[in-house]
Amino acid sequence: MTPSRDIARLIEIMAALRTPGTGCPWDLEQDFRSIAPYTIEEAYEVADAIERGDMDDLKVELGDLLLQSVYHARMAEEAGMFDFGDVVEAITAKMIRRHPHVFGDEEARTAGMAKGAWERIKAAERAGGAGDASGGSRPDSLLDSVPRALPGLMAAVKLQQRASTVGFDWNDPSAVIAKMREELDEVEAEIGAASPERLADEVGDLLFVVANLARHLHVDPEAALRAANEKFRRRFAHIEANIEERSGRPLGKASLDEMEALWREAKTTG
C-alpha cells in the first residue's frame, strides 16, 4: 500500500490494521477507552509543536491527531454506530449552522452577525432545540457540556464561561483578586492541620480562582502555565550547567543559597 494525500487511503490503512486475522494484533486489542489517552496526548503534542514554532513537526503531529479521529470512527463503524463520513458530515453541518453570517441567506447573515449569536446557537444545540441537528435530549445542567476529562485549568475556565452566560460572574477583576486572597488565607489556615483532604480542597479552590482571574484578564491559563513551565526549564538548566563550576559541588550537594544565586542570574537573561 502506498502513501497518498487522499483521506480515503488513511481510512483504508486503519481498516486493514483492524481486520481480524491479517491486521495488527495491538490495534485489534484496542477500544475507545484504551485509545482515548493517546487522543489527548496527540492534541498536546500539536499544541507543543505550535508553541515551539516547529512547522515540520506540526505537520506530523496534526497527522497523528487526524489518525485518532479515523481510529475512533473505525471502531464505531465496526460496532455499527457511525463511520468517518458521518463524522465529517456532523462537523460540516455544525460549522454551517454556527456561521449563518457566512453561509445563510441575507436575513440569516444579518442575524448571525448580531452580538451573542454564536453563544445563542451553541445554547440551542446544548438544549436540543431547533438549532441542534443531533436531536439530543436537554442536558440536566448548563455545565454538562463541559467535558470532565479536560485539563483542570481549561475546564475551570469553560465552567466559569458557561456560568457567566446567565450572569453568575464578577464584573471586576479586583473582586476576583479579593476572592483569591480569601482562598489563600483558607489554604494557610489548613497548613499543619490534621486533614489532608481539606487542605487539598482549599488548594483546589485557590487554583479555580486563579483560573478565573486569568479569564477576566483575557489570559489563557493553560498557555500561561506552559510558558511558565518552559521558563522554569530554562532557568533550572542554567543552574545545572553552572553549579559545579561555581560551588565546587555537583547538583544535589550544593546549597540552596548557591542554587538560588544562579537562579537569579538566569532570570536576568529570561
Image: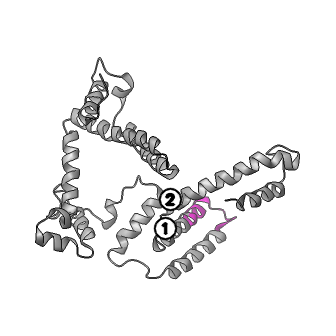
Mark 2 residue type: Ala
SS for callout 2? helix
| Image coordinates for residue 193, horizontal then vertical, percent | 67, 65
Vertical arrangement, residue 164 with respect to residue 239, above or below = below
The residue identified by callout 2 is: 223
Let me know if residue 128 appears in the view: no
Mark 1 and 2 residues: CB-CB less than 8 Å, in contact?
Answer: yes
Query: Tag 1, which secondary structure?
Result: loop
Q: Residues within 10 Å of mark 2 (few under 14, many from 20)?
A: some
Q: Residue at x 56, y 80 (%)?
A: 178
Q: What stretch of residues is rendered in magenta?
A: 190-203
Q: Decide whether the magenta segment is chiefly helix, strand or loop.
A: helix
Is 170 rendered above or below residue 199?
below
- Say if residue 188 shows up in the picture: yes
Query: In the image, which disc is placed on residue 143?
Result: none
Q: Which residue is mark 1?
A: 219
> Residue 107: where, in percent of width, then height?
11, 72
* Percent coordinates x, y for residue 203 in the rendering: 58, 64
